[in-house]
């Protein structure tokens, strides 16, 4: 029996997984949009985004629009590869769970 | 680790990924108001030109509407994420809008403006923009709008001035006002079916 893959722990957290999935469908997104879509609190969202940033899965861009600060996040190539790998591993595990 | 994870949990992760990806993509679809906005702008220009007998009606209305649309769209864009599809659709409409403005204004200033040409150009260009947009979005209803605009363009070319004007006003009502309202209603239904934050990660 082939060895089952391990799930990437950085992505496995539900909020981090939701964030990466959201960012995979857009070029970049603002912090407030991500908060609205996930229903998360500012503190938790900021902490999880920081973990993704530290892993190199998201890149941050800060700027001012009409004198208001805006924080934009985008998924990096590394993040896209990680999410693809995570989905592949998930499907493999699901297949194994169904067969068992 | 892997074998201890419940099948249910794995499925919920896959569902979460699917839901979030579609959430991100859905954010590009809320532009019904823009169709209504431009439909109303056209009607204002037509009414002003017809009853006000002013040669300034079209250029002034179109310039004011363009500026207003740009401000409203940029405010909306700040709240929504940037997507490749959104940029592609935006590029089509901005390109067509500029082309229409440049061609029609040049005709007006050269004194070569005449109603048949006006209807044919607007019908042809808006038909093209709707068709391109509908193909990108895979939205058959919008392709129907393209057909209606092309039909108006044909009537503008082969029909009388009255027939062309009626075809133009009908296309405007169907493809801008009705289609725009349809898009807005569809978007509000989607929002109520998938409220923001429902994914509670």
Image: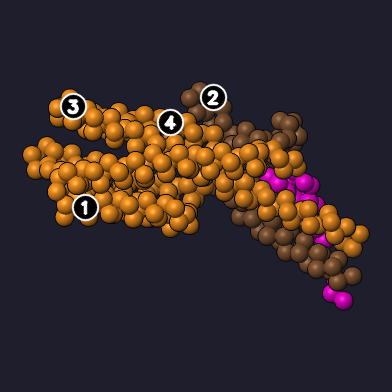
Chain colours: A brown, B orange
Question: Which tag, 3 or 1, sits closer to the chain's start?
Answer: 3
Spatial CA distance of label 2 from label 1 is: 50 Å
| Picture quarter with the N terminus of chain B | bottom right
Residue at 88% over, 57% down? B6
Chain letter of mark 1 equals: B
Q: Is residue A2 magenta?
A: yes
User: Along the horizontal axis of the image, is B142 left or right of A25?
Assistant: left
- Percent x, y for residue B77? 49, 36
Query: Which quarter shows the C terminus of chain B?
Result: top right
Dot 2 falls on a residue whose secondary structure is strand
Outermost residue on the bottom side: it is A1
Tally the numbered discs. 4
Residue B94 location, quadrant: top left
Classed neighbour count for the residue bearing mark 1: other residues with Cα under 10 Å, few (<14), some (14–19), many (≥20) = many
The disc at residue B155 is 1
Q: Are marks 2 and 3 on the same chain?
A: no
Marks 1 and 4 share the same chain: yes
> Secondary structure under badge 4?
helix
In the current view of this chain or complex, which residue is farthest to the right?
A: B4
Graded by Cα atoms within 10 Å as few (under 14), some (14 to 19) or many (20 or more), the crowding at tag 3 reads few
Q: Are marks 3 and 1 in contact (CB under 8 Å)?
A: no
Q: Are marks 1 and 4 in contact (CB under 8 Å)?
A: no
Q: Give the mark nearest the N terminus, 1 or 4.
A: 4
Question: Mark 4 highlights which residue?
Answer: B72
- The crowding category of the residue bearing disc 4, from other C-alpha atoms within 10 Å (few below 14, some 14 to 19, many at least 20), is few
Q: Position of residue B193 (x, y in %)?
A: 65, 42
The circle drawn on residue B51 is: 3
Alpha carbons under labels 3 and 1: distance apart: 24 Å
Which label lies toward us, 2 or 1? 1
Have a look at marks 2 and 4 and say if they share a chain: no
Residue that numbered label 2 is attached to: A68
The secondary structure type at the circle numbered 1 is helix
């Amino acid at each position: 029996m082939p060895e089952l893959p391990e799930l990437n722990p950085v992505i496995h957290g539900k909020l981090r997984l939701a964030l990466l999935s959201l960012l995979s469908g857009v070029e970049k997104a603002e912090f407030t949009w991500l908060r609205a879509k996930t229903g998360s609190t500012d503190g938790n969202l900021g902490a999880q985004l920081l973990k993704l940033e530290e892993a190199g899965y998201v890149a941050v861009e800060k700027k001012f629009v009409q004198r208001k600060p805006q924080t934009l996040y985008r998924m990096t190539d590394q993040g896209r590869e990680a999410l693809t790998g995570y989905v592949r591993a998930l499907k493999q595990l699901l297949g194994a769970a169904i067969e068992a | 680790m892997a074998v201890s994870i419940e099948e249910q949990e794995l499925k919920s992760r896959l569902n979460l990924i699917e839901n979030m990806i579609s959430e991100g993509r859905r954010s590009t679809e809320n532009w019904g108001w823009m169709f209504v906005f431009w439909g109303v702008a056209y009607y204002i220009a037509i009414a002003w030109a017809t009853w006000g007998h002013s040669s300034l009606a079209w250029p002034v209305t179109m310039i004011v509407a363009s500026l207003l649309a740009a401000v409203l769209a940029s405010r909306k864009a700040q709240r929504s994420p940037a997507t490749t599809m959104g940029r592609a659709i935006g590029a089509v409409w901005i390109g067509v809008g500029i082309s229409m403005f440049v061609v029609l204004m040049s005709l007006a200033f050269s004194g070569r403006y005449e109603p048949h040409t006006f209807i044919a150009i607007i019908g042809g260009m808006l038909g093209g923009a709707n068709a391109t947009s509908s193909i990108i979005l895979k939205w058959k209803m919008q392709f129907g709008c393209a057909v209606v605009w092309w039909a108006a363009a044909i009537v503008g070319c082969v029909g009388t001035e009255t027939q062309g004007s009626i075809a133009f006003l009908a296309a405007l009502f169907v493809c801008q006002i009705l289609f725009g309202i349809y898009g807005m209603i569809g978007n509000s239904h989607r929002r109520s079916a998938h409220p923001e934050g429902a994914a509670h990660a």
